[in-house]
């Protein structure tokens, strides 16, 4: 087994249930609330999401069956392979063993279709004909456009302006799959027009794009909104990643010492980590590390608070680490990590001390991505580069300590649509983005007067 590079599962070994970490939390998570501080009910979410997904959102069942039509489409690329990064290990001269779960094998090139297929299916079952959404780097917009086409739904995507300009081929991929993609902020919604009146050159944010997509959904016929991260059901759909990884490690008689994923809204991080966090809750010794950009350090610099998921405050207030719903990050190339808040479930497991968080600079991440591409061959997405950079830090630490260590990283997507970022890096045009502390404090102040989450019991 020492020469094995890929660990693969047969289709028959693919998980047939999603794992719901809500069943195993040491303390229950605070509920979403309205601006009056009162918990919201399923009926409050009904204009935005179909009831079958709302049921998953509030469920505390440990296992949720994956419908057969969803499994059949997931089989187009799942189970995804687990790789041993031997050439990266050799380049680093580390005693660590590095493994990565390759989620770039999906048609859209990332982990995002794992939930996009499921969400499109449940909306179709509920009688919905059209979905709206936002996208940062474009990976989620591509995944939902593809999924809607496969399920026979229409799809409208509001793409953050800076990524819309930086990543033209993502727009074209959405168009190939029948998605209608426009830049956000746009002139097609009240939320977008309001932002453009204040700043005609606004580069956009996920919070703004979410406002536009939700406004479109609640004012249009037979339409609902689909979210690519943050919410409980989205993270649950992604746990197929970690469940597969655990089976693959069992096949080779290995268990990771460290599990690493990049974190923006929390979906791919939760996907790889939640099944391992379950083990940790039940006594397993494993470290879990969430990695975010220094330009948008939600887990490392944001307070834990009730905050809105969007700038127009159309969503319920969620209990999460947040930089404030008015926060507009610097235009770093990791567009998928430029979100002001962290998923409530990811925020909660950090509060519980079950995970660690680190914020890394942009140039270190690109340097790590290039080394990965030059040793392992695959070109990573800018978002994925954060997990790679942290993996390299852990491998270097193992070398300094002279200890063998097993590292598992979620390789969340390829960067073949993000080559402009690599060009800027090679040409010396990229720089590390220093967080504007005054702007950050102003944004954090936007949460003043909102309800406050209760302390851990």
Image (cartoon, rainbow, N blue to C red):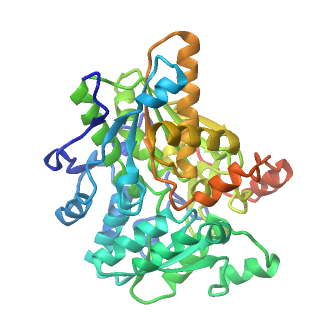
Q: Nearer the viewer, residue 359 or 173?
A: 173
Please state the horizontal and vertical placement of residue 359, each as a whole percent of the image.
Answer: 65, 39
- Residue 50 in view of the camera: no
444, above or below 166, in the image: above
Residue at the top extreme of this rendering: 402
Q: Left or right: where does residue 286 sit relative to residue 402?
A: left
Q: Quadrant of residue 3?
A: top left
Q: Nearer the viewer, residue 209 or 95?
A: 95
Q: Quick one: quadrant of the N terminus?
A: top left
Q: Left or right: where does residue 402 sit relative to residue 302?
A: left
343, above or below 149, in the image: above
Residue at the left extreme of this rendering: 12
Residue at the right extreme of this rendering: 438
Q: Residue at x 40, y 46 (%)?
A: 271
Please state the horizontal and vertical placement of residue 389, each as a whole percent of the image.
Answer: 58, 36
Q: Residue at x 47, y 64 (%)?
A: 140
Q: Nearer the viewer, residue 430 or 304?
A: 430
Q: Left or right: where does residue 51 sit relative to residue 253?
A: right
Residue at the bottom extreme of this rendering: 221
Q: Residue at x 73, y 52 (%)?
A: 427
Please state the horizontal and vertical placement of residue 276, each as a whole percent of the image.
Answer: 37, 33
- Residue 383 in view of the camera: yes
Q: Left or right: where does residue 299 sit relative to residue 6?
A: right
């Amino acid at each position: 087994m020492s020469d094995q590079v890929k660990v693969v599962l047969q289709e028959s070994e693919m998980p047939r249930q999603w794992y719901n970490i809500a069943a195993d939390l040491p303390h229950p998570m605070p509920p979403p609330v309205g601006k009056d501080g009162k918990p919201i009910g399923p009926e409050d979410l009904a204009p935005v999401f179909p009831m079958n997904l709302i049921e998953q959102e509030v469920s505390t069942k440990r296992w949720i069956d994956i419908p057969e039509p969803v499994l059949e489409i997931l089989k187009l690329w799942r189970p995804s392979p687990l790789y041993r990064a031997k050439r990266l290990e050799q380049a680093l001269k580390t005693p660590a063993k590095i493994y990565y779960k390759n989620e770039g094998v999906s048609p859209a090139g990332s982990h995002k279709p794992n939930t996009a297929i499921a969400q499109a299916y449940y909306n179709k079952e509920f009688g919905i004909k059209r979905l709206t959404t936002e996208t940062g780097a474009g990976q989620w917009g591509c995944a939902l456009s593809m999924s809607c086409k496969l399920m026979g739904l229409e799809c409208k995507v509001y793409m953050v302006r800076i990524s819309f300009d930086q990543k033209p081929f993502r727009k074209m991929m959405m168009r190939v799959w029948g998605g209608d993609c426009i830049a956000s902020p746009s002139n097609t919604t009240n939320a977008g027009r309001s932002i453009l009146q204040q700043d005609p050159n606004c580069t956009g944010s996920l919070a703004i794009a979410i406002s536009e997509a939700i406004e479109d959904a609640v004012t249009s016929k037979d339409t609902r909104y689909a979210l690519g991260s943050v919410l409980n059901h989205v993270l649950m759909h992604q746990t197929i990643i970690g469940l597969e990884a655990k089976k693959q490690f069992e096949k080779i008689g290995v268990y990771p010492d460290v599990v690493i994923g990049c974190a923006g809204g929390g979906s791919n991080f939760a996907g790889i980590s939640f099944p391992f966090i379950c083990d940790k809750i039940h006594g397993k010794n494993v470290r879990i590390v969430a990695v975010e950009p220094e330009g948008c350090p939600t887990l490392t610099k944001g307070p834990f608070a009730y905050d809105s998921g969007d700038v127009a405050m159309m969503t319920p207030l969620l209990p999460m680490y947040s930089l404030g719903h008015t926060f507009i990050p610097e235009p770093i190339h990791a567009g998928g990590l430029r979100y002001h808040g962290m998923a409530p479930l990811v925020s909660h497991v950090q509060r519980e001390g079950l995970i660690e968080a680190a914020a890394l600079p942009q140039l270190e991440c690109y340097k790590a991505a290039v080394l990965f591409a030059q040793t392992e061959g695959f070109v990573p997405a800018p978002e994925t580069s954060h997990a790679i950079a942290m993996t390299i830090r852990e491998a270097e630490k193992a070398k300094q300590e002279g200890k063998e260590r097993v590292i598992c990283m979620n390789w969340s997507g390829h960067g073949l649509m993000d080559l402009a970022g690599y060009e800027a890096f090679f040409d010396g045009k990229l720089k590390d983005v220093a967080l504007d502390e005054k702007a950050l404090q102003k944004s954090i102040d936007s949460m003043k007067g909102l309800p406050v989450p209760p302390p851990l019991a």
